[in-house]
Amino acid sequence: MTALSPHLRQATPVTAVRGEGVHLYGEDGRRYLDFTAGIGVTSTGHCHPRVVAAAQEQVGTLIHGQYTTVMHQPLRRLVDRLGEVLPPGLDSLFLTNSGSEAVESALRLARQATGRPNVLVCHGGFHGRTVAAAAMTTSGTRFRSGFAPLMSGVVVTPFPTAFRYGWDEERATRFALQELDYTLRTVSSPDDTAAIVVEPVLGEGGYVPATAAFLQGLRERADRHGFLLVLDEVQTGVGRTGRFWGHDHFGVTPDILVTAKGLASGFPLSGIAAPEELMRKVWPGSQGGTYGANAVACAAACATLDVVRDEKLVQNADTMGARLRQGLDAVAERTAGIGDVRGLGLMLGTEFVTADGAPDPDTAARVQRAAVDEGLLLLLCGAWNQVVRMIPALVIDGTAVDEGLAAWARAVETGTAQTEGR
């Protein structure tokens, strides 16, 4: 008898049979409020009618047109649509399937364009599970352990994780930039450094936003030393943070932008964007792939971008995110075991701590499980899995936010009561 790998454990006991908007329905017919969105993927909600219609129409005409063999119309449309939302100057695209593939494509471009071997990454970042992407990932050892040696040439530098350091953001930012300068003097010479790769908000690392001064400091150093700034917007892009791109909060423009997850509302699609002059420096034959820019995925992505625009979902993420944040803060104020609430837009995390301020993954797990009993689906993140994250679809409305907050308050009460009684 065959079965899935025993290590593919679901975060909840739910077997979903149907999805609609911000809700999933289990085999028993119970409705769950989904604040996971497939780890930030179903940006327009489950089975948005316009996305469904676009995919259905495309399935009936062309499912797969391998894009280094033939061109297809959905890809042409998607290139045009992305041109309307990408930062100015990032006018050349390479599309593939997953976030890991896109990150590795950005790495390949950076190394080939600069002729330099090393890449800097920030401590706590998550960039994927393939060998190079895992080598660049430091959000948890579970993503990178047990299949060494990993790719060489990766150098880790601090991220301004103010709460973990016990500092304010200004001090944490100053420290991170000082350590970056020290790293460039002691570990990876600028002449050996191809790029620095960073998430505008740490994802698996605990939903920690960067600061404007930090990202602007990276931009200044990249320009001064001649290496590239690569922003991993796999989770933060397409409206998630209340701006179309997460970096829009911080006043910087990357040399290479990485996107995936919410781009196609659940269909596998990812890509990188860079200036054409930079993209031309990639070596011939080094970009490709069988399934990249699949016709159905491209059609779904075009519909997704149309829905995001027409339904003003970026603005909705900002408004509903503020409403959700206010409710999370209110729960935190009356809960001793919550150390921090943070994030941007509809990408929010609540960190649980013990009485002495240490990470408390046990309570976080109890709260997450209690939330399932309340009909609310959530995920964990952070190095210890001590952070409960909320990433509902961008179509969420005030009624669903308030329903989720009520369920959250009950789950926190249940989970922390068990902590106090242990």
Image (cartoon, helix red, strand yellow):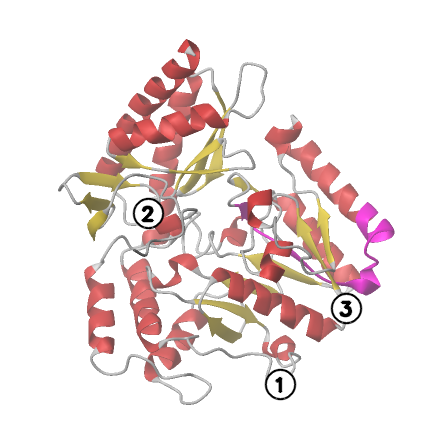
Name the residue tied to disc 2: 316
Please state the horizontal and vertical placement of residue 165, each as a whole percent of the image.
66, 29
- The answer to which of 324 and 1 lies nearer the viewer is 1
Q: Which mark is first along the chain, 3 or 1? A: 3
Q: Is residue 179 left or right of residue 390?
A: right
Please state the horizontal and vertical placement of residue 368, each as a whole percent of the image.
37, 31
Residue at the spot x=48%, y=66% of the render? 86
Q: Is residue 66 visible?
A: yes
Q: Secondary structure at mark 2?
A: helix
Image mark count? 3
Q: Is residue 295 left or right of residue 163?
A: left
Q: Nearer the viewer, mark 3 or mark 2?
A: 3
- Residue 131's mark? none
Residue at the spot x=18%, y=45% of the render? 25
* Distance between mark 3 and mark 2 Cα atoms: 42 Å
- Residue 116's mark? 3
Please state the horizontal and vertical placement of residue 257, each as a whole percent of the image.
55, 63
The boundaries of the magenta stretch are 182-202
Question: The residue under label 3 is which amino acid type?
Answer: Arg
* Distance between mark 1 and mark 3 Cα atoms: 18 Å
Residue 196 on the magenta segment: yes
Tell me whether circle 1 and circle 2 mark residues in contact (CB < 8 Å). no
Question: The residue under label 2 is which amino acid type?
Answer: Asn
Residue at the spot x=35%, y=63% of the render? 264
Query: Looking at the image, which residue sits at the far bottom?
Result: 70
Q: Is residue 253 visible?
A: no
Q: Residues within 10 Å of mark 1 (few under 14, many from 20)?
A: few
